Amino acid sequence: AVESTIHINRTLQDTFAFISDYERDPRWRSEVMEMCYQSPGPTSIGRLALEKSNVFGRRIETLTEVTDYEQDEKIVSRSISGPTPVISYRFVTPDGTGTQFTYRLEVDISKEPFFRFLRPLLMPLYQKTIESYLKHLKQILESER
């Protein structure tokens, strides 16, 4: 698993509204080319999103399902298709005048030979990648007031 936490100088509600809308992911997660919901309506448990990404030069499509959702607190989803099982956790908590955002990914690369072979290199690289995502997210949210 890889995990990173950052302070964002925005309200908990503003931060959660942004990070829980998966269609905004391409703005702050550079490998995501497109993310779109497969059903209309508000985000809730069971909602599906299709992610089209470019990971280490490979184009990947992953269908994810929201498995846990608490307004202004957390959103958790898991992949139900794609080359590697992934569980994504996004948590927000109040932090002084702003918000603490934690992003955690649990990735099972054991089933994909390409990724399994590179695991010793990939996990530290992906840790740095999610840290850069959070810095970019912070810039976006703090500049859009």
Image (cartoon, helix red, strand yellow):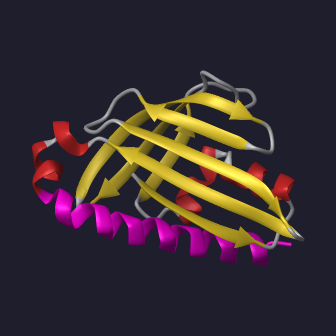
Q: Is residue 73 left or right of residue 37?
A: right
Question: Farthest residue in the right direction?
Answer: 97
Q: Which residues are magenta?
A: 118-145
Give the quadrant of residue 30: bottom left
- Residue at (27, 50) in percent of width and height: 59
* Residue under the image location 87 percent in, 69 percent down: 96
Q: Main secondary structure of the magenta part?
A: helix
| Residue 5 position in % (x across, y down) | 60, 65
Quadrant showing the C terminus? bottom right
Residue 52 image position (x, y, % from top left) = 40, 46
Residue 60, percent from left and from top: 30, 45
Residue at the (84%, 68%) spot, across then down: 98
- Left or right? Give the position of 4 relative to 119: right
Q: Provide residue 6's location: percent of width, then percent of height.
A: 64, 69
Would residue 130 appear left or right of 134 to someone viewing this image? Answer: left
**Residue 14 lies in the magenta-colored region:** no
Look at 69% across and 42% down and name the residue there.
74
